Image: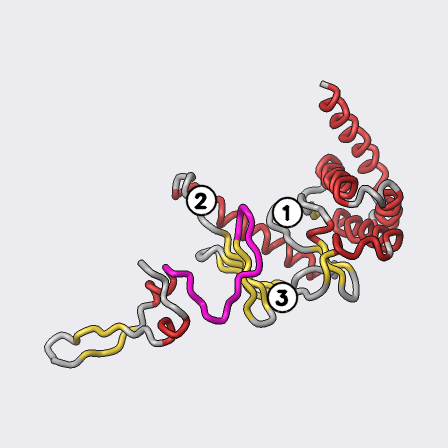
């Protein structure tokens, strides 16, 4: 089936013959349009392994896509659970005041989350302008998040936006946990990302992250002790 152009889509009307009459009544075929995933007001702005992102006015719609290699029942169950969990994490962030997208709507039938669109620059592109201060702020944001039991699970400067302040985005892999191990792994992922992407600013940037983290998370001591063990595991794997 060919996808209609914008002009054609605007004029798509189906006619259904009314029983017992010679009249034809217009019928807007919503199922057809949903199959095409067609919304003329939406613009695709990104895609990943789990979802496609669309810009719709001042909001972003995250459409968690189906995986053909999964058993349909399992696929639906997984996508529904992850959609609900991500929405709950964003809702918690909004509640405690950590800068991030504002939850507008969650639909676990269509597996879509609608959230506010955050304008600004990806932090990866501007970090070098003020690395010490920005990295310290990164640490504070993560410390606040961890102190409320939220694990991002994909911390990179690509998932942070700088506008009037630093905003954390893309909580598709996030979850709730109070375990020091989970928080340490979260920090370790950022450590590796900074060293890989911003090697010229590392390790001073990482030291600034830890400084900010200590100020924002009252329970930083056991987390950083666990982080040492996580890093040692990583080094041992490289040796082997």
Q: CA distance from mark 1 to mark 2?
A: 20 Å
Residue 46 vs 20, above or below: the answer is above
Residue 234 in which image quadrant: top right
Q: Which residue is mark 1?
A: 174
Q: Which mark is residue 67?
A: 2
Q: Which mark is residue 70?
A: none
Residue 53 vs 139, above or below: the answer is below
Q: Position of residue 101 (x, y in %)?
A: 66, 61
Q: Position of residue 48 (x, y in %)?
A: 56, 49
Q: Position of residue 120 (x, y in %)?
A: 72, 64
Q: CA distance from mark 3 to mark 2?
A: 26 Å
Q: Position of residue 58 (x, y in %)?
A: 60, 71
Residue 121 vs 70, above or below: the answer is below
Specify the quadrant that holds the C terminus.
top right
Q: CA distance from mark 3 to mark 1?
A: 18 Å
Specify the quadrant that holds the N terminus.
bottom left
Q: Is residue 16 left or right of residue 101?
A: left
Q: Which residue is mark 3?
A: 116
Mark 1 crowd level (few <14, some 14–19, many ≥20, 10 Å Cα): many
Residues in magenta, as a range: 35-51
């Amino acid at each position: 089936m060919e996808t209609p152009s914008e002009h054609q889509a605007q004029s798509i009307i189906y006619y259904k013959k009314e029983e017992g009459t010679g009249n034809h009544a217009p019928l807007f075929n919503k199922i057809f349009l949903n199959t095409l995933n067609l919304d003329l007001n939406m613009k695709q702005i990104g895609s990943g392994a789990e979802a496609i992102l669309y810009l719709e006015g001042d909001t972003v719609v995250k459409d968690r896509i189906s995986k053909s290699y999964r058993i349909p029942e399992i696929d639906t169950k997984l996508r529904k659970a992850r959609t609900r969990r991500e929405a709950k994490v964003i809702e918690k962030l909004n509640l405690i005041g950590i800068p991030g997208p504002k939850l507008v709507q969650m639909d676990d039938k269509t597996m879509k989350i609608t959230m506010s669109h955050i304008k600004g620059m990806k932090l990866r592109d501007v970090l070098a302008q003020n690395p010490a201060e920005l990295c310290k702020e990164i640490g504070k944001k993560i410390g606040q998040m961890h102190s409320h039991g939220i694990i991002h699970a994909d911390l990179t400067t690509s998932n942070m936006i700088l506008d009037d302040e630093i905003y954390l985005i893309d909580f598709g892999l996030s979850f709730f946990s109070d375990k020091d191990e989970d928080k340490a792994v979260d920090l370790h992922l950022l450590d590796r990302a900074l060293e890989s992407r911003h090697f010229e600013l590392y390790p001073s940037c990482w030291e600034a992250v830890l400084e900010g983290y200590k100020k924002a998370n009252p329970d930083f001591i056991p987390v950083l002790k666990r982080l040492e063990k996580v890093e040692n595991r990583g080094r041992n794997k490289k040796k082997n």
